[in-house]
Image (cartoon, helix red, strand yellow):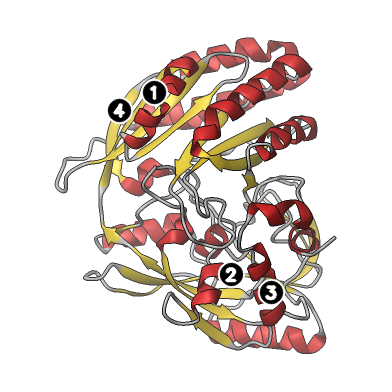
Amino acid sequence: MTTWTNWAGTVSADVTVVAPATVGELQRVVAAAAERGQRVKPIGAGHSFTAIGATDGVQLRLDRLAGIVRADRATGLVTVLAGTRLHALNEALWHLGLSMTNLGDIDVQSISGAISTGTHGTGAKFGGIATQVRGLDLVLADGSLLSCSAEQNPEVFAAARVGLGALGVIATVTLQCEPSFALAAAEAPASLDAVLEDLDEHVVGNDHFEFYWFPHTRRVLTKRNNRVLPGTELRPLRKFRHWLDDDFLSNTVFDRLNRVTTRRPALIPRANETAARLLGARDFIDRSYRVFASVRTVRFREMEYAVPRAAVPELLAGIEAHLARSGEQIGFPVEVRFAAADDIWLSTANGRDSGYIAVHQYHRREHEPYFRAVEELAMSLGGRPHWGKLHFRDAASLRPAYERFDDFVALRDKLDPQRMFANKYLSRVLDAQ
C-alpha cells in the first residue's frame, strides 16, 4: 500500500498502485480488479482539489500510458494515450505543425483528467477542452474496450467527454487539432468598473479574454490573447522579464506575501493594492500553448463556479458585498473567464454561454467560510461548480442544474452497475441522498 496525496494537499488515500504501459495491460488490470471485487480509479497529475480521483482500491497511475498514437496533419485528428500530460502533448503537437484550439491556464494535467473534470480556458467562441474531443476508447468495468464518438455509441460519447471517471477508464482520446498558431498577448492593469462597463465588448472583441480582480480594491489585471497571422514573427518575453513576472513576482514574492498576511490579515487590502500595481502592462507574441499556460508553485485551495455570462457582474458584486459585510480578508485575486455553450451532458457550460468565477485561498488559511458564501451567491444565479474544484453540493442539489443529469446516472447504472469506479465524492454528487 502507498499513501497518495493530491497536488493541493486536500485529499490523501492509502492505495494499491498499478502503472499500466499499454491499453491491453490497462484492460487486464481492470478485469482482474473486477474479479477480486476491488474498486479502481485512474490518476494523472492529481491536480483536482476534490476527492474525484481518490480510491480505497487500485489506483491506476497513467504516466506510462502516454504519448501520441497517431496524428493526421491533413485532418488535424490526433489520438493520444490517456496519461499524456498537456505540456508534453502541446510541445509534441507543435513539432507536428499542430495546436490545440484552446487550453486552460495550467498544463500539468493529463489529457484524460482534464476532460473528465471539465477543464476549460477562456474565449467567447471556444468551449472547454472536452469540446475538442472527437473520440474516446473507454475501458469498462469488465475490462472490455468501448469506442465512442458522435457516430459510434453517441450517448456514451455525450456523457464520457466530461465523465468524472464514473463510466470507465479512458484509454485513448482523439482530439481535433488545427494548424499551429501563435497568440499576441496583451496584459494590462485596469479598473474593475471600466472592465464591467464594457464587459461584452471585451469578451466578444477578443479571441481569449480574462481578468483578475484583487479583492478589497477596484483594481484588475486584464489578459487579452488574440491570434496572429501565420508567419508572424514571434516576440516572446525576454528571459529576465519572464523570470521577474512569472517566477519571482507571481510565485516567490506572492508566496512570501501570503505567509506574512496569514499572520497579519489586516495587511491584506494594502498588499492587494501593491500586488495589483506590481503586475504592470506587457505585450508579447509566442506559441499559443506558451501563452495559454502559466507556472503555479504557490499552494492554494480553489473553488470555481460557472454562471450565465450575463450574471458575472452580479456575482462579483455579491462577493464584494459579502467581504465588506463579513470582514473576511482575501489575499488571492478572483479569476474571471468565459466559454461558449456546449452539448456535453455534465459540462458546466452545457446549453449556455458561461462566465467562470474562480475564488482562491492560501493553503495555510481557512477557506470554507469564504467558499460557502460564494457558493450560495453562485447557486442563486444558477451556478454549476467545477467538478475538480472544491464545492459543497450533492446529487439532490446538482440534479436541477443539468437537464441530462438523470440520463448520465442511468448510463452509469448500465456501464458500471457494481460501482467499480465509484468513490465517496462520486457517491455524493451522483447518487440519490
Q: Nearer the viewer, mark 4 or mark 1?
A: 1
Q: Image point 57% across, 36% down: which residue?
A: 357
Q: CA distance from mark 3 to mark 4?
A: 49 Å
Label 2: which secondary element: loop
Dot 1: few (<14), some (14–19), or many (≥20) neighbours within 10 Å? few
Give yes or no for contact between labels 3 and 1 (Cβ–Cβ under 8 Å): no
Residue named by callout 1: 198
Identity, as a three-letter code, of the amino acid under mark 3: Ala
Please give left or right for residue 121 compared with residue 156 in the image.
left
Q: CA distance from mark 2 to mark 4?
A: 37 Å
Residue named by callout 2: 62
Q: Nearer the viewer, mark 3 or mark 2?
A: 3
Q: CA distance from mark 3 to mark 2?
A: 28 Å
Q: Position of residue 205 (x, y in %)?
A: 31, 34
Residue named by callout 4: 283
Q: Position of residue 417 (x, y in %)?
A: 75, 80
Identity, as a three-letter code, of the amino acid under mark 4: Asp
Q: Image point 26% across, 64% down: which residue?
A: 96
Q: Position of residue 209 (x, y in %)?
A: 39, 35
Q: Nearer the viewer, mark 3 or mark 4?
A: 3
Query: Which corner quadrant holds the N terminus?
Result: bottom right
Query: Which is nearer the N-term, disc 3 or disc 1?
Result: 1
Q: Look at the image and tell me whether residue 198 can be seen.
A: yes
Residue named by callout 3: 410
Query: Which is nearer the N-term, disc 3 or disc 4?
Result: 4
Label 1: which secondary element: loop
Q: Nearer the viewer, mark 2 or mark 1?
A: 1
